[in-house]
Image (spheres, coloured by chain):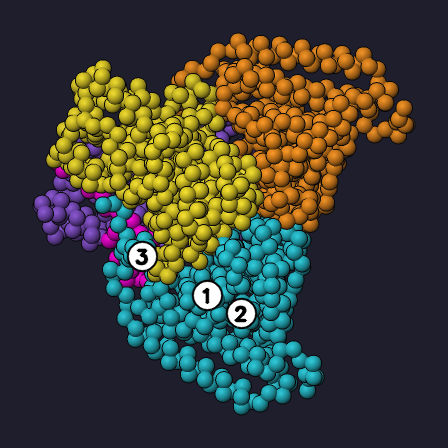
Chain colours: A purple, B yellow, C orange, D cyan
Amino acid sequence: MAQLTYRESVSLAIAQAMRKDPKVFFIGEDVGAAGGVFKATVGLLEEFGKDRVMDAPISEQAILGAAMGAAMTGLRPIAEIMFSDFLAVCWDIVANQIAKTRYMSDGQITIPLVIRTANGGGSKFGAQHSQSLENWSMMIPGLKVVAPSSPADVLGLMNTAVNDPDPVIFYEHKSLYASKQELDNTDLSIPFGQANILHEGSDITIIGLALMAQRSKKAAEILKEKHDINAKVLDLRTLVPLDLQTIKKSINETGFAMTVEENPRLCGWGAEISSLITEHCFSNLKGPVTRITTPHVPLPSADILEDNTIPSVDLIVNEVIKKIKGE
Amino acid sequence: MAQLTYRESVSLAIAQAMRKDPKVFFIGEDVGAAGGVFKATVGLLEEFGKDRVMDAPISEQAILGAAMGAAMTGLRPIAEIMFSDFLAVCWDIVANQIAKTRYMSDGQITIPLVIRTANGGGSKFGAQHSQSLENWSMMIPGLKVVAPSSPADVLGLMNTAVNDPDPVIFYEHKSLYASKQELDNTDLSIPFGQANILHEGSDITIIGLALMAQRSKKAAEILKEKHDINAKVLDLRTLVPLDLQTIKKSINETGFAMTVEENPRLCGWGAEISSLITEHCFSNLKGPVTRITTPHVPLPSADILEDNTIPSVDLIVNEVIKKIKGE
Amino acid sequence: MVDISNDDIGEINRLKLWEMMLKLRLVEKKAYDLFLQNLIKGTSHLALGQEAIAGAFGVALQEGDYTFCTYRGHAHTLARGSSIEGVLGELMGRQCGLMKGKGGSMHLTDVDKGVMGSYAIIGAHLTIANGTALASKYNKTKEVSVCFFGDGTTNIGAFHEALNMAKIWDLPIVFVCENNLYMEYTAISDVTAVEHPAADRASAYSLEKIIVDGNDADEMFRTAQAAIQKAREGNGPSLIEAKTYRHSGHSRADPGKYRPDEEVKDWLENKDPITNYRKRLLDYNIDEKVISDIENKIKQEVEEATEISKSSPIPDTKEIFTDVWADGGYEWHN
Amino acid sequence: MVDISNDDIGEINRLKLWEMMLKLRLVEKKAYDLFLQNLIKGTSHLALGQEAIAGAFGVALQEGDYTFCTYRGHAHTLARGSSIEGVLGELMGRQCGLMKGKGGSMHLTDVDKGVMGSYAIIGAHLTIANGTALASKYNKTKEVSVCFFGDGTTNIGAFHEALNMAKIWDLPIVFVCENNLYMEYTAISDVTAVEHPAADRASAYSLEKIIVDGNDADEMFRTAQAAIQKAREGNGPSLIEAKTYRHSGHSRADPGKYRPDEEVKDWLENKDPITNYRKRLLDYNIDEKVISDIENKIKQEVEEATEISKSSPIPDTKEIFTDVWADGGYEWHN
Ligand SMILES: Cc1ncc(C[n+]2csc(CCOP(=O)(O)OP(=O)(O)O)c2C)c(N)n1
Ligand SMILES: Cc1ncc(C[n+]2csc(CCOP(=O)(O)OP(=O)(O)O)c2C)c(N)n1
Ligand SMILES: [Mg+2]
Ligand SMILES: [Mg+2]
């Protein structure tokens, strides 16, 4: 029985994968000697040495290009992009090369590659180091998209990611790195496309991801305790593949749906889920799907500003009450 | 009275802007001497000379960076990214720099910049030269997003784009370059955020953009002639700002909504519109919003494959019939 | 008659080079014909005039080595031994195409032959090629990776990142810049801060400056062999700038009018790699009949392959939905 | 005593450099204190030890010139004359901050002073700085653009694209690489194919190789002046590599333990730009009292500004919704 932080789970998950499979190696900036800027890769260099834990120059295109090429030969690289915002500097490699090459080659090329990256706000880092970019990957055919909300999910989903034959973008939430969990087994495996029920309830279904899943869970606890509302909370865990069955089933039961996402408003994953729910559950819906999102602004830096921009537990509670009890 | 192609409208619109305002200049790859790979900038170098029509190296980041910096001083650059797919190689400049700098600087910096780019499929160019990427820009706060469907709209919207104080991504559709229109005035101005009604009807509202707006219009004509269905077709023309009023008004009248987009399925602009319609018009909806999209695959190259991937007029017709008449 | 007393290349390799270049030339010409017959849709970028480069590497490389090329990659693909009908079929979007029409002319891929893809967005494949080279180093195997690209590509960021990484990790890779003097329609000298877009930047990565006449198959072969050997022996990357010229326009739609007539004429009449190599073979005392037998053989091969690809069916539309994922399908939800 | 008979810098400029460096030093130290007091949230990247570079350019530049810096840009912003409370207030997220807390420490911007922004994603601002330089050329005005960045930045693609473009268009710009030997925690020599990450690449853009002791304010000032003059006179860009060292860790969270103790000690004790410059001023016969009067003045300025910024209110949450667009608002629909 060990207490693990989310950040420790990352390094443990990578270490476990590297112990099991000599084909797995790890590449990134400042990841080795220093253990990563979020200290999420501490100990890897010491255990696996420079050949398998590679400190790279500030060359995100070259990092992902090399990881892709290596994966094409059957190796299983894990590449770090320090902040998800930096995906923008290597977006061609991600969206045009890694995602499309299998299809364009008619299946001749397989790319078993994991890109892990620190995502999301809450650290007062400003607009270029705080974005929630799961939707950037979700919109590109050929990418699998993972965003764990707990240490156990980090372990179980990283295990699956490393063993998956397709490219996976693994979004770790910066504001969850310090979160802890008691685990009696760390060798976990969680299949992709399986939402996790964080809270049971029959009045409404709240659908979240990563930090927003945890906040939705807290909101559900408050709603239950103080407002006698029973909210079911689904943590999607992976956007691609998507657990549409669980979503449909739950909405058909509760009749009310709410998505809670950290993405800015336009074209976030919540829009996709909302459109799916409307398409598949229309006759069972008691009202429109509500989308809670970050407003459509770049993220401000000052604490009071950032705190009031990203959806909070209070906001979720209030929106649920409005929805259930009528405005 | 002149007959103009869409491609001629592009060069004419740029020329008109450059004649009116010495602050406007144009930069891109192979745009000057050769008049652009789509021949959409023919004659500009001859008229305005090398100082205002700049042939750049294959350096998309440097091109957009230079355009952004120049715009910060009050100039009004128009920059070409040859294919919208190449936005990926300069996505940091677009999404992290151009879009966010005004906000981060608390309004000190203004970026009156137009990025025009050839977008969309239909040319059998394969997965890296055929994408429909309006949603990439729509999801980034700070960018305005334009996608004209006719020569007149190219003229009117480019005029507005060049005079707009904010950064505008101007998506020209490759498959429309050859399309023609009779125009008796070319000095047009069309405000952003004003959808165009391409076809009147009261049975269903079809919402399209660029090539998909034109196909929706053709579908509406067929539906009227052959199937006695009256479809209203809205050409959004700009995704940001969005003409939500017109959308709402129309859906509230027709009760049925369909979006037709060329984006692959996940997180396309249609998802956003669908979620908005559900949110704002729920009680007037007679059924779920239908989304027609390209399936969630990279675009194949062979003609039979590409033609069967991008939404066709027939597909729209059939989906509307299914929807109205029940399956 | 030329003195060949000290010849390092030898007749066998020379005939291989001859056969290889001819094949590349004739297939590209056939591709042009098929395009004129409207049998090739989309775009296509011919390497007519640049055959000595892909050809020399094709002869110098071993099975198992990796090559990466651009949209202008028909020749480079054929040079690794891919079938002519696989290439032409792909250009025509037929089932016999290397990727059954899913990739198209700009993305020719034939992993069995070491053709690790053709890349249509400038720059990316230089970084990806580092990856197969890294894998060889990681696995302690001896494959060499070769990455072909154009002069225009030297001005994009990925070029810089890839070269630096290749050098610091001493990867077994050869970067080959085919300097044909133009990007699409713009002269490379108009947009580049140095005279030799690749070679003058070698020192920025502590690499040797290598410039070679890319239209001289022998010189290309020697340069290719040396760089491949260096990489194979674990002595790190090379950057080669091969001077050449494309005979036709940038792509199918381009008549190439931005190039001075004299320049075009000079390269076509005086510097054609194939015309000149034929002369050299004769100078080297190789029997005219041997030479023309090869010509006839290749011509026939190309004609036969053309017929095969023309009669190959178009792909089934269900191909649209295959191979997004390794499970063969495209589903994104359960 | 030093021979100053032939002095090209002069007492006035020397005292300006002294005052400037002190200001940068003391504000950075104050920022560190405020961080320890938990008054600065988020991150912050101090330029302690690198003051001579920003300082020399601050003195050498004219009003109207444009500067671009990185997340490590407090010093560079102050060097253009931005107010101390504007900088500290921004770090603390107060209304008196340069951007009222909307940008934060990594994005200091003060357009009135020519501070065209601080950029937190490596590489981008080199290309953007070309843009203001291009505007000066386009408008035939005489401003010079200066772009500061670190050694680690020389390995990203945008560096390469920006340098090439600056040269081919002969833009009035000065690129200043502050080589402090480390990217975040990784020694630059571990990940760079050349010894001098910027200077050894100058030739790749037909630029002169310039290496300067970035901790010698006089040398920095001379080098800055020369490059600025060159740009102002229409003679194109320069790339300067200034050798320096940061005294503290990469950012607030970093104790900098990856650096050898001796190395740190040597730079702090023997190569500190401010300690050494104070000695030089005395060597140059400048009155100790003049020197310490400036010290006292700056100390007081910093204390006063600190109080102002501490007592400045936090911003109103309605700021969240302003200035996405030039109309002041954030609406994306009608
Ligand atoms: C990032 C990017 N920018 C622009 C293009 C459009 N483009 C295709 S080929 C080409 C010219 C490339 O020139 P060069 O590298 O010299 O190769 P060549 O075509 O001469 O073989 C350009 C600009 C592209 N494919 N990718
Ligand atoms: C594209 C990108 N990659 C990585 C980072 C993370 N990062 C921030 S600062 C830094 C080190 C930069 O080193 P250098 O250029 O030498 O500047 P210094 O911090 O030493 O001033 C890194 C890797 C980033 N901000 N942007
Ligand atoms: Mg070329
Ligand atoms: Mg540094």
Helix, strand or loop at label 2? It is: loop
- Whether tag 3 and tag 2 are in contact, CB under 8 A, the answer is no
Residue type pointed to by label 3: Asp
Front residue (pair D197, A118): D197
Q: Quadrant of residue B87?
A: top left
Helix, strand or loop at label 3? It is: loop
- Horizontally, is C53 left or right of A134 in the view? right
Q: Is residue C262 above or below residue C99?
A: below
Whether label 1 lies within 8 Å of ligand 2 gets the answer no
Residue C158 within the magenta-colored segment of the rendering:
no
- The residue carrying mark 2 is D61
- The residue carrying mark 1 is D114
Q: Residue at x 27, y 42 (%)?
A: B193
- Horizontally, is C291 left or right of D314 in the view? right
- CA–CA distance in space, label 3 to label 2: 30 Å
Front residue (pair C59, B94): B94
Whether label 2 lies within 8 Å of ligand 2 gets the answer no
- The residue carrying mark 3 is D323
Residue D125 spot, x, y in % from top left: 49, 55
Segment tinted magenta in the rendering: A286-312
Residue type pointed to by label 2: Leu
Front residue (pair D165, B319): D165
Q: Is residue C2 above or below residue B97?
A: above
